[in-house]
Image (cartoon, rainbow, N blue to C red):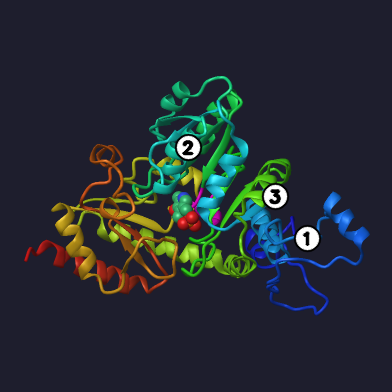
Amino acid sequence: MTDFKPRTKAVHGGTRRSGYGEVSEAIFLTQGFVYDSAEAAEARFVQAGDDEFIYARYGNPTVAMFEDRIAGLEGAEDAFATASGMAAVSGALMAMLRAGDHVVAARALFGSCLYVLENVLRRYGVEVDFVDGTDLSQWRAAVRPGTAAVFFESVSNPTLEVIDIAGVAEIAHAVGARVVVDNVFATPVFSRALAQGADVVIYSATKHIDGQGRALGGVILGTRDFIRGTVEPYMKHTGGAMSPFNAWIMLKGLETMALRVHAQADTALRLAQALEGRAGLRRVIYPGLASHAQHALSAAQMDKGGTVLAVELEGGQPAAFRFLNALRIGLISNNLGDAKTIVTHPATTTHQRLPDDQKVALGIAPGLVRISVGLEDPDDLAEDMAQALAAAAHKE
Ligand SMILES: *Cc1c(COP(=O)(O)O)cnc(C)c1O
């Protein structure tokens, strides 16, 4: 499949057909695998071949199809599929780090990623320093010879800061640190993080890969040596494997991902342009807007601005709540990357746990609303946002 373009790989990559010659990928809902003889069992435990499986926590044909398909798309040597995005983040970090290691991470992170870095890793003796991820001089000052890894979200949640993958990678590689990128917001469709210098790329497949809000999943991508030598032994013994059923959902999700994500990003740009400058809004944040602080970097690093935008309402939390409550299409929830438009008030939900000073530092204002743009008609969405904005301006 290597000579085909991404959309072809997304439909055919990794396919393994059973003896029945099925067209659609089979779901191998089996925990175990039967051996022809005791000798064959012994041989497989010594060294399992490429298409030989032992136990679903170690690997499974449907899961392997998903791993090979996403690895091919991403241009990675290999991939390990996990039960959720957080199983991928925590698994990749726990597998590669040991007590005494030093890690530098961007401060603007998904809440659970922050927990893993601040609480879990520190508890096991890993030293973690946080920096403003958009400021390369802070990365330069924070790394030191022997720093084991740097970690960041290439586009941060929820304020959509864009981090310079190549810039951070140059600084990290100069001291021998591994570059680990949580690439969810950039999506596998718009990003080429590995080519830009990332060593390990992580996705929550729950988001755009499923794309229809059904199942949890995650994936760790990197070199074969890292995935099979470092990640697999840790994951297969600690239990964060992806279910074969979820792998099938993700496989089928990959087939339509490019079409969905392009349509969602086009609508997101259109909504961002329509909302920018409107009365009642303090700011509209979208990497595809010329007004975005890292617009040039975003345009150089990603094909499009992504499927998520954020708006900050004047009038703080009351106005933000009136806006959310007045929407007729956007659903109030906390996920993203769904076919359905989802709106979130980060300050009171996903980022509620953060102390106020950290919310201020990260730009998570009381009036901030995150909008994950779905596949609805763009005209309907634009009209709905406009009427909700008008409603938000009217205090009861
Ligand atoms: C959702 C998300 C995760 C966690 O993924 P789950 O599948 O919910 O475990 C990690 N990082 C980012 C940036 C996310 O958006």
Sequence-wise first label, 1 or 2: 1
Q: Quadrant for residue 357, please give it.
A: top left
Q: Residue at x 15, y 58 (%)?
A: 319
302, above or below 124, in the image: below
Q: Is residue 129 left or right of residue 192?
A: left
Q: Position of residue 158 (x, y in %)?
A: 35, 50
Residue picked out by circle 1? 53
Residue picked out by circle 3? 78
Front disc: 3 or 1: 1
Distance from the alpha carbon under mark 1 to that under mark 2: 39 Å
Give the quadrant of the C terminus.
bottom left
Tell me if residue 186 is in the magenta stretch. yes
Of all residues, the one furthest to the left in this rendering is: 396
Nearest the viewer among 316 and 189 is 316
Q: Which residues are magenta?
A: 183-192
Residue picked out by circle 2? 164
**Mark 3 surroundings within 10 Å by alpha-carbon count, few (fewer than 14), some (14 through 19), many (20 or more):** many
Nearest the viewer among 129 and 98 is 98
Q: Residue at x 27, y 41 (%)?
A: 355
* CB-based contact (under 8 Å), mark 3 and mark 1: no
